Amino acid sequence: MRRKGSLYLLGRLYDLAFGHMFYALRRRVAAAVERDGLYPWLDVCCGTGSQLRGHAPDLVVCGLDKNLGMVRYAAARAPGLPFVCGDAGRLPFKDGSFRAVSVSFGLHDKSPDLRRAMMAEARRVLAPSGRLVAVDFENPWSFKSKVGALAVRAVERLAGGEHYRNGRDFLSRGGLKAFLRESGFVESARHDVEIGSISVIVARVEAHAI
Ligand SMILES: C[S@@+](CC[C@H](N)C(=O)[O-])C[C@H]1O[C@@H](n2cnc3c(N)ncnc32)[C@H](O)[C@@H]1O
């Protein structure tokens, strides 16, 4: 079963295309969690599970994705780590169960309603001392990031249809920074990646948003 999962073509192609490119981002997200020992850690919209791959099973981590093929692939590539098939807009976890929730490239492609539901769920499952670590697109802020944004737009066009439209909508509303602020999160640290017009933001839940 595990071996079969690892043969999932979409997972293999995704890792092949983006595994190397996203390596530094994965490390940055992991460092934000590791630095403050923010376990248990939930990675939503985990895709191929590459964010959690390599973590010791005794560090409590969990990946969640809606695509069963991806979940099986993720589990096959990271033996010993739990991956759950579920909806990030309706998380199957109790209130306050996690000290970190991460979401990488899992917001811009969703509809505004699903994005909002995902953030409401992230706020619900985060413990009071917890942190959200989000990686996604920002509107370009420099010449280099404008070039990066053009390349990203070309790739997003290939993803097509709703994914592309939702991505344009996400940026037209101000990108990751604005979305997190509207969703009741307060930024505590950020790292901007000019070449992709991407940001990694660490945020806590705003007191009155709980
Ligand atoms: C662009 S991929 C990002 C994957 C991964 N986080 C990464 O950084 O490579 C978006 C992921 O969201 C998942 N997804 C879509 N709708 C979802 C939902 N409602 N709940 C959970 N996952 C969902 C897709 O299956 C896909 O794996």
Image (spheres, rainbow, N blue to C red):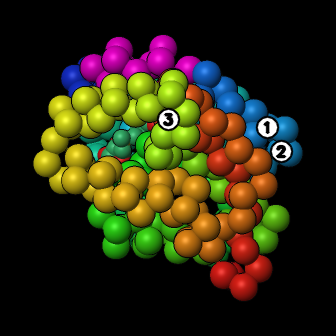
Membership of 42 in magenta stretch = no
| Residue 186 or residue 70, whichever sits in front | 186
Taking the spot 52% from the left edge, 67% from the top edge, the residue there is 119
Q: Is residue 5 visible?
A: no
The earlier-in-sequence mark between 3 and 1 is 1
| Label number found at residue 117 | none
Please name the residue that numbered disc 1 is placed on: 34
Amino acid under label 3?
A: Ser
Highlighted magenta segment, given as a residue range: 13-23
Question: Residue 194 location in percent, x, y?
Answer: 56, 29
The 10 Å Cα crowd at callout 3, few under 14, some 14 to 19, many 20 or more, is: many
CA gap between label 2 and label 1 equals 5 Å
Of helix, strand and loop, which one carries label 3?
A: loop
Position of residue 154 relative to residue 204, above or below, is: above
Question: Residue 9 location in percent, x, y?
Answer: 22, 23
Name the quarter where the N terminus is drawn.
Answer: top left
Position of residue 59 relative to residue 195, above or below, is: below
Question: Residue 7 location in percent, x, y?
Answer: 26, 20
Q: Is residue 206 visible?
A: yes
Please name the residue that numbered disc 2 is placed on: 37
Question: Residue 203 location in percent, x, y?
Answer: 71, 57
Please name the residue that numbered disc 3 is placed on: 197
Residue 15 quadrant: top left
Left or right: 202 with respect to 180?
A: right
Taking the spot 72% from the left edge, 74% from the top edge, the residue there is 206
Of helix, strand and loop, which one carries label 2?
A: loop
The earlier-in-sequence mark between 3 and 2 is 2
Disc 3 vs disc 2: which is toward the camera? 3
